Image (cartoon, rainbow, N blue to C red):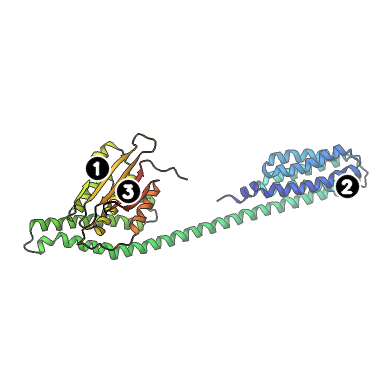
Amino acid sequence: MIHPLEQLRHSAWTPMTVAGAGFVLAVVGWPVTAAVYGVDPALAMVVTVGHSVAAVLAVRWPWAGLSLAIPAAAGTMLVTAAAPATLPWPWPVTSLIAHCLTLAVLAVCHRWYWSISAWAAGALLTFLALVLTPPRGLLTNGVVLVAVSGAVVLLGLMVRQWILIAGQVEKAQSLSAAEARRRRELEERNRIARELHDVVAHSMSVITVQAGTARYRIDGLGEQTEREFEDIAASSRQALGEMRSLLALLRTEESEGRLDTVPMPGLVDVGDLVEASRASGTQIACTDVAELSAVVEVPPTVGLVVYRVVQEALSNALRHAAGAAITVSITPDAPTSENPALLVEVANTAPSATTEAMPGSGMGLAGLRERVMSLGGAVAASPTDDGGYAVRARIPLTDPVPT
């Protein structure tokens, strides 16, 4: 959040407003100083413009505004010293107003010592002018300057403090709103985690236990049937482990920080995934991922996305194309270029006419596109010429540049 005073100083409206006020004072003060006080027009222009420019400079650079305001005030006193005793001196009215404008800008936009220093310098100049010149009977002019400019400084410091307090209140409100939003998000994630635990994790636990104990509970199981139950138990244990990791992420507020500590599958685990899928009796041909991992360096984030692409594509093929042969291909694309990537393709042949496809929600491919696009890649899914279906993804091996 930008500091309110910094925002005030760097806003285009602040110098424009001060410049507008300074321009009016210069336009009025120049002819008044020249005509009423009998000052040469050129000198009158220099001192009056100096006062106005000092106020504008004080918006951004307090030292510059102070350095110009004091010489401009001293110059005004010198050029108007020969004026009749009936005129206000040593501070003509226009000069007094311009000096107060500079003090107001210093008090509001900068630390207190700048405005106090400018006020003290003006009071000192007034004292020296009244001491070093013959008595003119207009001591009240100096008193007015000291009193009015002091009031302007005090009012400016109060305005500055009000701006600071308002900024702190706004910051506190923003932090409170952000904290409330994070709390609502965490509560919603906890609710989702509870639902997942009660519905999915419980069911997966039951499947794991039933498949793992089938050989002890059921007599007369053949060796092939026992292996089938063991494969089901292994797959369900893996899914249950990933579900527990997901629940742990959902139940913590710092999920991004915990993501690196949770074990996630990668490219080397694709072989185990394919082997577990073959237990369903489906014919699946797959690239040797161990050999590919030895040749191509794959970041963990990319490996996880590759695993999820193959996992979702295999699940779709097993549900919608029962009895079809499946091919899993993972090959490097332009490994020597500046934009190396992995090409992932999971294709199945036409399904058997005697099997019925299982229904799906259609959200899997949408989730895949989001995962791959987050790494700067692309996904395409379409039917093949032989009546099958293919999912193709190009996943860059380098992290995308944040925008």
**Residue density around tag 2, few if under 14, some if 14–19, many if 20 or more, within 10 Å:** some
Q: Amino acid at mark 1?
A: Val
* Residue 263 visible in this rendered orientation of the protein: no
Total label count? 3
Give the mark nearest the N terminus, 3 or 2: 2
User: Residue shown at 28%/44% (left/top)?
Assistant: 330
Q: Separation of disc 3 and disc 1 at Cα?
A: 17 Å
Residue 78 image point, x, y percent = 86, 38
Count neighbours of disc 3 (C-alpha within 10 A) and say few if under 14, some if 14 to 19, many if 20 or more.
Answer: many
Q: Residue furthest left?
A: 220
Would you say the residues marked 3 and 1 are in contact, meaning their CB atoms lie under 8 Å apart? no
* Number of the front mark, 3 or 2: 3
Q: Which residue is mark 2?
A: 88
Amino acid beneath label 3: Arg
- Numbered disc in front, either 2 or 1: 1
State the residue lying farthest toward the front: 385
Q: Tags 3 and 2 in contact by the CB under 8 Å rule?
A: no
Where residue 110 sits in the image (x, y, percent)? 66, 46
Q: Residue at x 88, y 47 (%)?
A: 88
Tell me the residue that label 3 is attached to.
392
Does 253 sit left or right of 158 as displayed? left
In the drawing, does residue 305 fall left or right of residue 67?
A: left
Where residue 184 sits in the image (x, y, percent)? 43, 62
Q: Is residue 177 visible?
A: yes
Type of residue at label 2? Answer: Pro
Could you give the CA–CA distance between mark 2 and mark 1, rounded to whole angstroms? 94 Å
Residue 302 in the image, given as x and y percentages of width and height: 33, 45
Query: Would you name the residue on which mark 1 appears?
Result: 289
Where residue 23 is drawn, which disc sits there? none
User: Between 299 and 75, which is closer to the camera in this rendering?
Assistant: 299
